Image (spheres, helix red, strand yellow):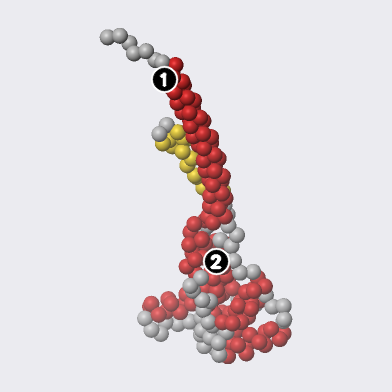
């Protein structure tokens, strides 16, 4: 069967078609370059946002995984020590979650009962919220109820620059323990009058306040 001859007109059309395809391929390659550039910029912005939100220094490993023969970045986070985490051991994602949760919890009021317990809860609240020392005393004032308000006002009258540490000592000295006398005296005179569990509870209540009281 004789081969089909290609006329000059057909050849010109084929050549034009090839040139058109080459132009389309060049345009596609240019578009891919722009897309890759945009993805890198978006990726950098995402990493920056993750570092701000998670409190982590994000490291990108370019060769940890592959998809379709191409490397896919795998983000690895190294936790930073976050201010205000204290001895609770909370940091990074855990601390952020805890802060979101604690926003729903109000600083408890204080009516003179169990000062050590109230101070402990207040310390956790202040630490998680990152409360500055200057604000702690003002927040504590809002929590005073009943006769504690008058006691607080008398403290402020004597010391306008009262610190949180000074306030804690004053509350423990004034309201610590049960009954008459300071905590030391109540502890030495403590006797079992009910069940063993009640005795242990009272002992723990008193002993927990001793390290925080001012030196005698």
Q: Quadrant of the N terminus?
A: top left
Q: Which mark is residue 128?
A: 2
Please state the horizontal and vertical placement of residue 39, each as a whole percent of the image. Answer: 52, 43
In the figure, is residue 148 to the left or right of 192?
right
**Residue at (72% x, 81% y) in the render:** 160
Residue 15 appears in view: yes
* Mark with earlier residue (1, 2): 1
**Label 1 CA crowd tier, 10 Å (few <14, some 14–19, many 20+):** few
Please state the horizontal and vertical placement of residue 199, each as a whole percent of the image. Answer: 42, 79
Q: 127 or 212: which is nearer to us?
A: 127
Q: Is residue 55 above or below residue 107?
A: above
Circle nearer the viewer, 1 or 2: 1
Q: Is residue 82 above or below residue 146?
A: above
Q: Quadrant of the C terminus?
A: bottom right
Q: 198 or 9: which is nearer to us?
A: 9
Please state the horizontal and vertical placement of residue 174, each as a whole percent of the image. Answer: 60, 84
Helix, strand or loop status at disc 1: helix
Q: Is residue 181 above or below residue 9?
A: below
**Label 2 CA crowd tier, 10 Å (few <14, some 14–19, many 20+):** many
Q: Which mark is residue 95?
A: none
Residue 214 occupies which quadrant of the picture?
bottom right
Question: So how many labels did they put on this image?
Answer: 2
Asked if the residue at tag 2 contacts the one at tag 1, i.e. Cβ–Cβ closer than 8 Å, the answer is no
Residue 154 occupies which quadrant of the picture?
bottom right
Helix, strand or loop status at disc 2: helix
Residue 79 appears in view: no
Q: Which residue is mark 1?
A: 10
In the figure, is residue 203 to the left or right of 37?
left
**Residue at (30% x, 9% y) in the render:** 2
């Amino acid at each position: 069967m004789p081969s089909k001859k290609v006329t000059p007109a057909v050849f010109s059309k084929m050549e034009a078609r090839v040139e058109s395809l080459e132009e389309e391929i060049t345009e596609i390659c240019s578009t891919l370059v722009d897309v890759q550039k945009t993805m890198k910029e978006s990726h950098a912005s995402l990493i920056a946002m993750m570092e701000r939100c998670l409190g982590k220094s994000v490291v990108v490993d370019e060769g940890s995984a592959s998809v379709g023969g191409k490397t896919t970045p795998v983000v690895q986070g190294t936790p930073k020590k976050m201010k205000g985490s204290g001895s609770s051991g909370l940091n990074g994602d855990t601390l952020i979650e805890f802060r979101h949760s604690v926003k729903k919890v109000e600083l408890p009021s204080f009516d003179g009962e169990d000062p050590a317990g109230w101070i402990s809860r207040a310390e956790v609240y202040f630490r998680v919220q990152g409360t500055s020392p200057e604000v702690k005393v003002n927040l504590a004032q809002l929590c005073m109820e009943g006769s504690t308000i008058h006691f607080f006002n008398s403290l402020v009258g004597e010391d306008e620059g009262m610190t949180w540490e000074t306030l804690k000592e004053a509350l423990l000295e004034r309201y610590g323990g049960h009954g008459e006398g300071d905590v030391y005296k109540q502890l030495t005179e403590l006797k079992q009058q009910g069940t063993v569990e009640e005795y242990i509870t009272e002992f723990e209540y008193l002993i927990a306040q001793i390290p925080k009281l001012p030196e005698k």
